[in-house]
Image (cartoon, rainbow, N blue to C red):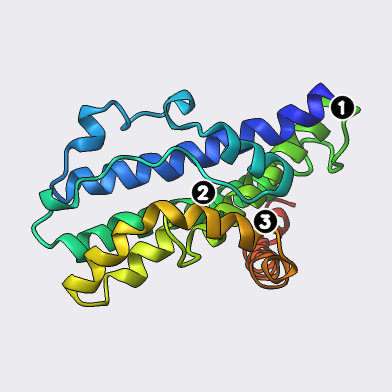
Amino acid sequence: MLTGVLISVIPALICITFHELSHGFVAYKLGDPTAKRMGRLTLNPIKHIDVFGLLMMVVFRFGWAKPVPVNMMSFKHPKRYMALTALAGPASNIILAIITLLIYGLTYTALGGRQTLETAGGIALLMIERLAQISVALAVFNIIPIPPLDGSKVLFSVVSDKLYYKLMKYERYGMILLILVVSTSVFSSTVGRATSFLYEKLFVAAEAMHKLVN
């Protein structure tokens, strides 16, 4: 049971760390040093954990981390740069998933070619694939246009400045709406299917790498 938990928890920690680090790094490069000053430009997962969000990822493969603080007033173009900062998280997870799947295909035969808890190689394969699955799920989940998820910041960036700042005031209530959405069948039939579809398409990378080395 402990091994099974670790197979989910460790990949989830890696995914949220890359996700939040990417937000902070892009924000820093675009002119906002807030995340750097608060010690969030780090690969230390403890700095990025939201316990409930991590639990959601382990159980449902959809969840969130502690948001990296961003002061959009530090940006030269606040709305545009905020959208780019928001997109950095999901983009990093897609890149991480592709790299992980390439590793999966490369090492599949060497690790025994079978996902099982009975061998070290099988456990490694399970963990590698789970990392890719959670990474894709995190990317898809975060492009939902409901505050405080990344998709809302991208969507809000195309509205007028007046409406943008008005919408941002209600961001705190978005989590309630988000939990309600996640608990419905609509969520699994849309976000769940989108995640499965994208993962299947990206898994081609693993298959190609496996054929290349064998």
Q: Is residue 97 above or below residue 38?
A: below
Q: Quadrant of residue 6?
A: top right
Secondary structure at numbered mark 3: helix
How far is mark 1 from mark 2, CA to CA?
A: 25 Å
Comparing labels 1 and 2, the label whose residue is closer to the camera: 2
Residue under circle 3?
206
Q: Would residue 61 appear left or right of 29 to someone viewing this image?
A: right
Secondary structure at numbered mark 2: helix
Residue sitting farthest toward the right: 118
Nearer-the-camera pick, 200 or 110: 200
Q: Amino acid at mark 2?
A: Leu
Q: Earlier in the sequence, mark 1 or mark 2?
A: 2
Which residue is located at x 72 percent, y 58 percent?
Answer: 211
Q: Which mark is residue 119?
A: 1
Nearer-the-camera pick, 132 or 100: 132
Nearer-the-camera pick, 164 or 69: 164
Q: Amino acid at mark 1?
A: Thr
Residue under circle 2?
96
